[in-house]
Image (cartoon, rainbow, N blue to C red):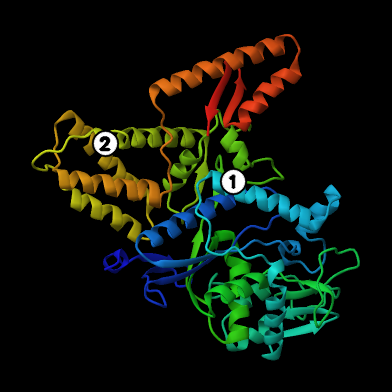
Amino acid sequence: MQLYQSNPIKLYNSLTGKKETFKPINEGHIGMYVCGPTVYSNVHLGNVRTFMSFDMVFRYLKHLGYKVRYVRNITDAGHLENDADAGEDKITKKARLEQIEPMEVVQRYTVDFHNILNTLNFLPPSIEPTATGHIIEQIELISKIIENGFAYEVNGSVYFDVHKFNETYEYGKLSKRKLEDLIHNTRVLDGQSDKKNPQDFALWKKAEPQHIMRWPSPWSDGFPGWHLECTAMSTKYLGEQFDIHGGGMDLKFPHHECEIAQNEAAKGKSPVNYWMHANMLELNGQRMSKTTGNTVNPDELLSGNNKFFTKAYGPSVIRFFNAMSSYRSILDLTNDGLLASEKGFNRLMDAVNLLDDLKASSTSSIGVLAWKQKCYDAMNDDFNSPILLAHLFEAAKYINQIKEGSETLSSEDLDILKDTINIFVYDVLGLKNTAKSESGTDKLSGAVDVLIRLRQDARANKDFAMSDKIRDELAEVGIHLKDGKDGTTFSTN
């Protein structure tokens, strides 16, 4: 008997707006698709929050014994910003600014994306398809939508006919928007657009002469629309209907809404049974924005090289911080919050490090099985990681009480406690025990202090090249220096 048979999951379905008992299409098997990054810049920390939430979901489903096919795409074909009718796509724009090939942009930021996720201890998805690798499938999908009467071609571009679609199906059912309201709140076409209606969206755009990324199609040399790739790739690898589609809350409309419409227009069926959306990550109570400067990259958070935080934070502290809030809640990234997370993480790990030294007794004064079930109940309730952490801290209290002798556990119950903590701390939450022996820590601190003094001497002698060399070479081995008004401190990842 697999664990999933005794642990039914209740998950919040964005499509219905309520928690539902999860039932996969095929028992024991789950198909899950999560919208990946558009690789034109360093991965955004808000996106990392989304991917981290679904990494935890993936981990837990695997732990329960499900065979999970997890597909997370890479958008390496530039699309027009905000699904506009004209303009420059993000990847081509970056390539033009840096005077390099678009695929150099794609390669650089795909590598950055993978490096960040590896550092943060993500499990890789089962399949990571690229948009450029599935142009044929996207063209075939467009042809089918045209054949079914839900799209039209104008001057080499193809548009999805939202009004025609809405006569048969319901456009807006995911985001709970009515087409009538969208029409009322949309500006009148100015005559310069090829679209019949403002609500229509591009399936294929004819490339202007200066547009570098282009492919041949029956309609023109051009490129696919923003929403099309996910429909093509998700259904190719997971089937015309699959279990879970995830992404950030900002993708619910129009991106995910258009995915549903495309699939229904092409195949006559809704593609996904359960839609899951992770909420936003804010920075100091405000939306992250490059234009206002209220933003920080993951590597800046890891290194401490930023203006918002007093120190660097390790990958497991960042994962712990993420787990302190439900994936459906807005999470506010603050210095105080990260400091509290670091303290909480260290307190939990201090208890975990005592486990191997605990002595078993003949009887148990703690109901370990009931505690274990509470951990599963938390995750079974829409992956409620904050409640899971509360139960893990309850276990930390037990560990300290057993060490002090005020509580006891039998050998069998002690093994259950150890196994359960290892499952949820390491396998499900993806934390790593970064604690080192005191002697090792003291030696490291002493060695780094010597290098900090040498760097200070170099700066006093205006030998800035040597000063930078010491800082940079320490950073390469994971030791990050941070200069402050009280002197130089260091942190390790």
Is disc 1 surrounded by few (<14), some (14 to 19) or many (20+) residues within 10 Å?
A: many
What residue lies at 30% left-to-right and 46% top-to-bottom? 421
- Closer to the camera in the image, 284 or 407: 407
Which amino acid type corresponds to the residue marked 1 in the rendered image?
A: Ile
- Give percent across and percent down for residue 345: 40, 37
Q: Are the residues tagged 1 and 2 within 8 Å (C-beta)?
A: no
Left or right: residue 126 versus residue 255 is left
Residue in the image at 8% along x and 42% along y: 363
Out of 419 and 180, give the one closest to the viewer.
Answer: 419
Whether residue 276 is visible: yes
Q: What's the mark number on residue 448?
A: none
Q: Quadrant of residue 225?
A: bottom right
* Residue 92: x %, y % from top left: 81, 58
Secondary structure under the numbered disc 2 in the rendered image: helix
Circle 2: residue type: Asp
Q: Is residue 196 above or below residue 435?
A: below
| Image coordinates for residue 262, horizontal then vertical, percent | 63, 79
Taking the spot 66% from the left edge, 70% from the top edge, the residue there is 229
Which residue does the numbered mark 2 point to in the structure image?
Answer: 356
Marks 1/2: CA distance? 32 Å
- In this picture, residue 363 sits left or right of residue 89: left
- In the figure, 330 relative to 442: above or below? below
The residue to which callout 1 is attached is 116
458 versus 397 height, above or below: above
